[in-house]
Amino acid sequence: ETTHFGYQTIAKTEKVEKVAEVFHSVAAKYDVMNDFMSFGIHRIWKRFAIDCSGIRPGQKVLDLAGGTGDLTAKFSRVVGEQGHVVLADINDSMLKVGRAKLRDLGIEGNVEYVQANAEALPFPDNHFDLITIAFGLRNVTDKDKAIRSMYRVLKPGGRLLVLEFSKTDQPMLSKLYDFYSFNILPAMGKLVANDAESYRYLAESIRMHPDQETLKGMMEDAGFEGVEYFNMTGGIVALHRGYKF
Ligand code: SAM
């Protein structure tokens, strides 16, 4: 995996540092920017994920790379007092913003905040009924390792939902989207958050992310069964779902 010069290792460390820097810098403005840049559509993508989650009262949920906690807020209400939601994120700035936001919304009691790396989850085997990772997997350095780690902590019968940017197969939409993400997005980041660089990273990480079929294969390789995906907004975003049996 590494050359004897440790080349690969250096590249990996750089990615980890870059991701940390980006999310420390966007944390305070993250929610505003999300609405602004997606024209509010991220709410519809998340709503669809929740509708596909099969979540029920009393269940244990892991909202991985949960950031400012949009999904956690919804899950917390559904699982109720008997249930439990863990919002895990590698970045303490994002966790702080998330915790403050959920407290303001009156969401307390069944939510726990954990600083954790998706590649090495600090939870017991066979623990969660549902794991979601929304717009998080593309930031993870070793995605296969992370997916295996998620598989380990899921209960048999549990399911994983991956909500992530993906590839559109419509040429016109693809051109429009490239222009938007490489030109308009950094300009908006500069204007609203005085931070073009973070939003340039965002566009690059989206372009590098595995497409629908590749991600499906990665989930199957980690042991997931019944893996399927649903395209949204012409495939700009996809929801993958898989089960551990
Ligand atoms: N899930 C939230 C949402 O949909 O609004 C937040 C998504 S945000 C774009 C991506 C999050 O992934 C950030 O909060 C970042 O800190 C987190 N993240 C990046 N790498 C991670 C890793 N290796 N393990 C856990 N979280 C990570």
Image (spheres, rainbow, N blue to C red):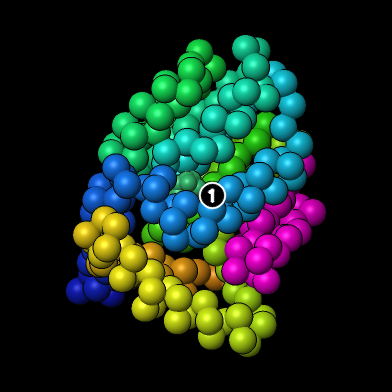
Residue 26: image location, x then y, percent: 29, 50
Give the residue at the far right of this rendering: 226
Q: Residue at x 55, y 64 (%)?
A: 165
From this viewpoint, is residue 118 visible?
A: no
From what the image shows, is residue 135 above or below residue 6? above
From what the image shows, is residue 63 above or below residue 26? above
Residue type for callout 1: Ala
Residue 40: image location, x then y, percent: 54, 53
State the residue in front, 2 or 26: 26
* Magenta stretch encompasses residue 240: yes
Residue 206: image location, x then y, percent: 46, 69
User: For the residue labelled by badge 1, is the local secondary structure a helix, a strand or a loop?
Assistant: strand
Instruction: Report the label total.
Output: 1
Quarter where residue 120 is shown: top left
| Quadrant the C terminus occupies | top right
Q: Which residues are magenta?
A: 218-245
Q: Residue at x 32, y 70 (%)?
A: 186
Ligand 1: does it lie within 8 Å of the C-beta at label 1? yes
Q: Which residue is mark 1?
A: 134
Q: Is residue 189 left or right of residue 148?
A: left
* Magenta stretch encompasses residue 217: no
Q: Is residue 245 left or right of residue 87?
A: right
Residue 185: image location, x then y, percent: 38, 69
Q: Residue at x 38, y 65 (%)?
A: 202
State the residue in front, 183 or 10: 183
